[in-house]
Amino acid sequence: MIGLPFTPLSVYWCHDISGSLVCVVAEVHHTYGQRHCYLLHPDAGGRVRAEKRFCVSPSFPVEGHYRMRLPYSEERLDLTVHLDTEAGRPFTATVRGRARPATARTLLRAAARRPWSTAAVWAGSASTAYASWVPLALQR
């Protein structure tokens, strides 16, 4: 949505000059604008495990580990991120899609088809953060 950018996860596949995958960088953002990068070395299937090192949401403390599936493909995007803790799996996210050129026309069409998707993610994150902050503020 124009004017309200929020991208909780950005993934960068890093290739050497021959085209071989060297690593993946998963950049995680939270509502307050901070970010943390995970330098990952997935197996041949795109699977990798990383210890959680950053507070993305007040709903999930900094504990446990991520299990990610981040296969590289020029045609399709098919990512899965699980948060595993001692108590279980409180969070799973998936992102799927087809590759398309990032032209002005395709970007505007995508924004017109789902105009509230960014706002909905931002509002959900902000309301969760606010709900966790209010009790702390009232204790002061």
Image (cartoon, rainbow, N blue to C red):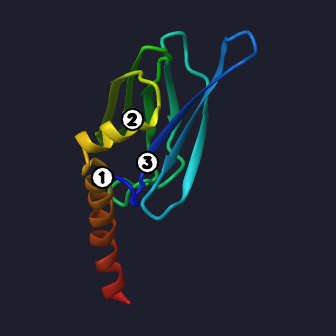
Q: What element carries label 3?
A: loop
Which residue is at the front of the view, 111 or 14? 111
Residue 136 at x, y percent in the picture: 35, 79
Where 39 sits versus 8, above or below?
A: above
Q: How far apart are marks 3 and 2 (CA)?
A: 21 Å
Residue 87 at x, y percent in the picture: 30, 43
Which residue is at the front of the view, 62 or 101? 101
Q: How far apart are marks 3 and 1 (CA)?
A: 9 Å
* Mark 3 crowd level (few <14, some 14–19, many ≥20, 10 Å Cα): some
Marker disc for residue 79: none
Marker disc for residue 121: 1
Q: Is mark 2 on a helix, strand or loop?
A: helix
Residue 140 at x, y percent in the picture: 38, 90
Q: Write down the residue under mark 3.
A: 7
Q: Distance between the residues labelled 1 and 2?
A: 24 Å
Q: Which amino acid does label 2 sit on?
A: Arg
Which residue is at the front of the view, 45 or 116? 116
From the viewer's perspective, is 12 left or right of 67? right
Mark closer to the chain start, 1 or 2: 2
Mark closer to the chain start, 3 or 1: 3
Q: Write down the residue under mark 2.
A: 105
